Image: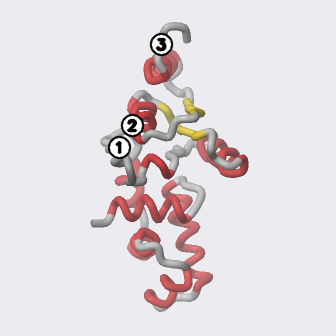
């Protein structure tokens, strides 16, 4: 849209078409840029550095009603991870509340970086059972892999 910046474009598009699912594809991976996109109504933010398969899975997730937030938005490093106060994960808090107690335990262990084998040993369950719990957690959180779950879990637990 001529004369507008990205966040303003997102906001105008969402005002005109409230059901529109806006996905930002960008070379920038700054947590603040990502935060701005979500605060203005984006449903996904896809860095151009994503591998093709990951990008396709992220788009499938978004088209199915989910949200894709790149790991860069949650990482701390040279830049502090931007706070996403209310822009995505009010939904995350509600979703975590819907996890079963066992799914919550598995989610917390993912945040500790534990493998399925380690989680199984600690909880006295089989690896196959843990895989089922991990799959349930990924579906509930609408994310595509355990790395994303681990990042989210590490941010939720002190």
Please, which residue is most extreme toward the top here? 3
Nearer-the-camera pick, 45 or 13: 45
Crowding near the residue tagged with mark 1, few <14, some 14–19, many ≥20 C-alpha atoms within 10 Å = some
> At 49% across and 62% down in the image, what residue appears?
149
Which residue corresponds to the image point at 39% horizontal and 53% vertical from the top-left?
77
Which residue is label 1 attached to? 82
Residue at image position (46%, 71%) is 110
Residue 32: which disc? Answer: 2
Element under label 1? loop
Q: Which quadrant would residue 86 be assigned to in this image?
A: top left
Q: Quadrant of the C terminus?
A: bottom left
Sequence-wise first label, 3 or 2: 3
Structural distance between the alpha carbons of marks 1 and 3: 23 Å
Q: In whole angstroms, how far apart are the C-alphas of marks 3 and 2?
A: 18 Å
Which label belongs to residue 114?
none
In the shown orientation, is residue 81 left or right of residue 140?
A: left
The answer to whether the residues at label 2 and label 1 have Cβ atoms under 8 Å apart is: yes
């Amino acid at each position: 849209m001529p004369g507008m910046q990205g966040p303003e474009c997102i906001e105008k598009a969402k005002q005109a078409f409230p059901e529109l699912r806006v996905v930002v594809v960008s070379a920038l991976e700054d947590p603040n840029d990502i935060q701005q996109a979500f605060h203005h109504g984006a449903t996904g933010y896809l860095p151009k550095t994503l591998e093709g398969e990951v990008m396709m899975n992220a788009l499938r997730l978004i088209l199915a009603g989910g949200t894709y937030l790149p790991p860069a938005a949650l990482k701390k490093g040279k830049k502090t991870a931007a706070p996403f106060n209310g822009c995505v994960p009010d939904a995350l808090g509600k979703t975590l509340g819907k996890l079963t107690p066992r799914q919550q335990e598995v989610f917390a262990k993912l945040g500790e970086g534990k493998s399925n084998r380690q989680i199984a040993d600690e909880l006295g369950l089989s690896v196959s059972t843990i895989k089922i719990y991990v799959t349930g957690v990924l579906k509930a959180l609408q994310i595509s892999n355990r790395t994303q779950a681990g990042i989210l879990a590490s941010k939720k637990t002190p």
